[in-house]
Image (tube, grey):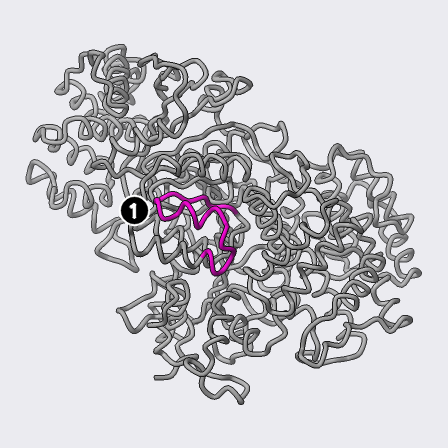
Amino acid sequence: MADNPGISLGDVIFAGIDNNPYLNELYDNILHNYALSLFGITNKEPKPVDVADALQFADVLSKSTDEDNLDRHKIWAQEIVALLKAMYPDNPVVLDYFGTVLLSTENYLGLAKNVPGFCGRTLLDRFYTEFSMEFLSIPAEQDKQFFRSQKEVYDRLTEPYFSYSGPTSMGKSYIMRMFIKKQVMDGTKMNFAVIVPTKALINEVYSKIIEDLKIDDITGYLSERNYTIITSAGALQLNKEHQNFIFVLTPERLLYLLISHPNIKIDYLFIDEAHKISAKDSRSAFYYKVVDMLDKKQKPHIIFASPNIPNPEVYLGLIPNAELKADQKLSTSFSPVSQIKTLIDMIGGEVQTFNSYTERLEDVFDFKKGFVLGQIINLINSKGNGGKAQSIVYFNSKEKAVEYALDFAKTQPEQDDPALITLANEIKNVIHGEYYLAKIITKGVAYHIGYLPAAIRLRIEELYRERKIRTLFCTSTLLEGVNLPADNLFITTYGKGRGRSKMKAVDFKNLIGRVGRIEYNLYGNVFLVRLEGNTKTEDFVKLLKEKVPEQELSLVSELDESQKKQVVDCLLEGDITLENLKTKTKESYKIIRKFAVILLRDITNNNHSVVHQAFEAYLEGDVKVRIREVFRKTGSEPDDDINVSVDQTKSLYWAIKNDELCYPALNSDRTVDYDDLMNFLTRLSQVFNWNKYESDTIGNDKRLKWYGVILRRWINGHGLSFIMSESIDYYRRHPEKKVSINNRPEIYNGSAKHKNSVIGETLEAIEHVVLFSLANYFLKFTEAYKRYHNIQGDMKNDWYEYVEYGTTRPLTIFLQRNGFSRETAMYIREHVDEYVVDLDIENPKLRRSIRNCKSASVRKEVESMLYNIPDLFVD
């Protein structure tokens, strides 16, 4: 050391600590004994663990100065003391070290929840703790502290642009929300946009921002500082002058907001779950479009947040001409919570622990073959958290999630819980009396599928947080950002979707990070379960070991140079269909076509977006001039809506002009005639070339008739329960339309299984076809019709509104445009005399007494609306 003055004692201590054989033996034994305790195994002797030595190692690791392994060491220290505390809850020495380690890692939230009042052993500890807590205090909530990595991010959010990544449990979106909260509290007049990948996440972020900005049970900063949260481009509050907004939108909704309200200024754009920009999914193209539109006109601060990726700066590549600086990116690996990984081989009858630091499997015990997954879940639930542990069980298909949920529920007793019974009755009333979910939820078991109505999904999440629902079966929808207090996560497959593709490392790390949330606990259990013979343990282990690779923009990964040249060649021919483009999958074709649509718009507008720049090598000389000319001659002018291409737009305007195509008139009772609807859908199919672009769904003539049945009932304002009954009746009358059971067609037989299959298919059709595909095409028709006929403001007989809001009734539309769900809006309309005043004027009001109505879901929504749009209510 004397010969190397730059080396400290800490460097020597920590340089080799990861490979210390005694530390690794201790940790292996702790994992082994924890597993025995977790599974209640009493016929095997635990391995020897010198608790004092383990605590000393944890203390040393928590004080690591090794820059390359600092986060790893601190996480390891927390794991050791957390597991020892779980196994020796009454040991005062363990509790003392537990507090000391959390102080050293500056995990003050974990400390407050687990060792309240602990501030160190010595006076020096207390002084440092006081200084550190003050330094890390959250400006908007000064009695709470950031983690140091959160503080580093927060301090950089005023940069023109910034991209950061961290573990799933880091609290990335929390940092954004605290920044927004501070600006609102200070009276700053700005507009903020938080972009999330799914509609399910819109609801979660909306609810959390409402909670963040409450002052007390009556008032909130939203109304006091003149802010409103907006979750759709059709919100009536957008027309209010001198109002500030917090937008919570998907990329698609943001695009339509920018198109329909081009003068709205956005000061801060936060893109959460930004790794979706790298997805091999046509939706990733929307990120490019909205970032370019905003950066070109407004230059907002643009912030990207991603889970687990090593190169977050890659997403700054969406910003044209952005100059990357070192302080505009941050990647951290520190997590305030940990995941303890266990492999359960149901085929081989074996349980093994996985040591994340040595990356080795260790045998724990064998069990008799014949056990089923439900028995394992029951056992784990009964052992953890005082016998009341909660679990999430992940499957890659909706059918399996439902099937296993039903099997598990058979082994569970009725809970006799009023909240569960109320939700079960609500599901029966809202969806269908024979829907499986209503049958099992009274046992504290549920499944969480993307197509469930938002109000039902939110109630399931709420009752899970309240620990009334203890076991939740789900697909990736729940795990794409919704945070729940799960103690255990069972992963039954490494497959992705229904195909044979496997999860990527970034998806897998994001998935396992969903258990163990600092708001609820310091660690969570991840069980990797081999349920079937074709599932390989080594593939699970490979994912556990695999580091998340550097990410690429989808613009880079999905287009090779030959495809770029093909796209340009097609545009030179005036062809935007890209008929001869060679791609491996339909999804790849869709995303490249969207990039082609963006490129054509850029060329005609002389806009140098990052998409334009990617094709620059093939646009030399007079190529751009020739492309402009060929599309000018055909009368095909592209616009900013990338859901449709210029050939579709041209065909649409031709039909409006020459065929006088318009929406059919409503019947005298404001209902839609089925024949009129089908004639219009058939004409739209021709205009938009659905056979080419939507061949799997609305481009299929037989399926279009089925969607027509659903759409008519939807537009006519029927409740979901009625629509489900009609769908079931349709199958009864058309036995040739077979139901899909485990991906196999079966003739409809009227059984509960077949009815639930029809219900699931109908709910999925409403969510993905009616409210997405058809709604987007109807919106395009409305915009073109208004533009051609020079209609300003709202349009009479606007079928886009009827599709988007599922009704032709003005009151129901009005309520939804103010932020209520369709179900709640229909409930209010059914009780109009009780809760609505000033019905005859343009802006009716609601009585505050509605907060005491009989529907729990309605009460929940009303509570949020009272904070967000208090002017809507009167006493």
632 within the magenta span: no
The front one of 444 and 554 is 444
Q: Is residue 734 above or below residue 498?
A: below
**In this image, 82 relative to 781: left or right?**
left
Residue 272 at x, y percent in the picture = 49, 49
* Percent x, y of residue 86: 20, 30
Front-most of residues 127 and 424? 424
Residue 111 against residue 429 in the figure, above or below: above
Question: Foreground residue, 867 or 453?
Answer: 453
Residue drawn at point x = 75 percent, y = 75 percent: 786
Magenta range is 427-449
The residue positioned 20% from the left and 14% from the top of the image is 46
Q: Residue at x 24, y 57 (%)?
A: 142
Quarter of the C terminus within the rendering: bottom left
Instruction: Confirm whether the magenta stretch covers residue 447.
Output: yes
Q: Residue at x 53, y 70 (%)?
A: 816
Residue under pointer 1: 415
Compared across the picture, whether 455 is left or right of 707 comes to left
Q: Is residue 315 visible?
A: yes
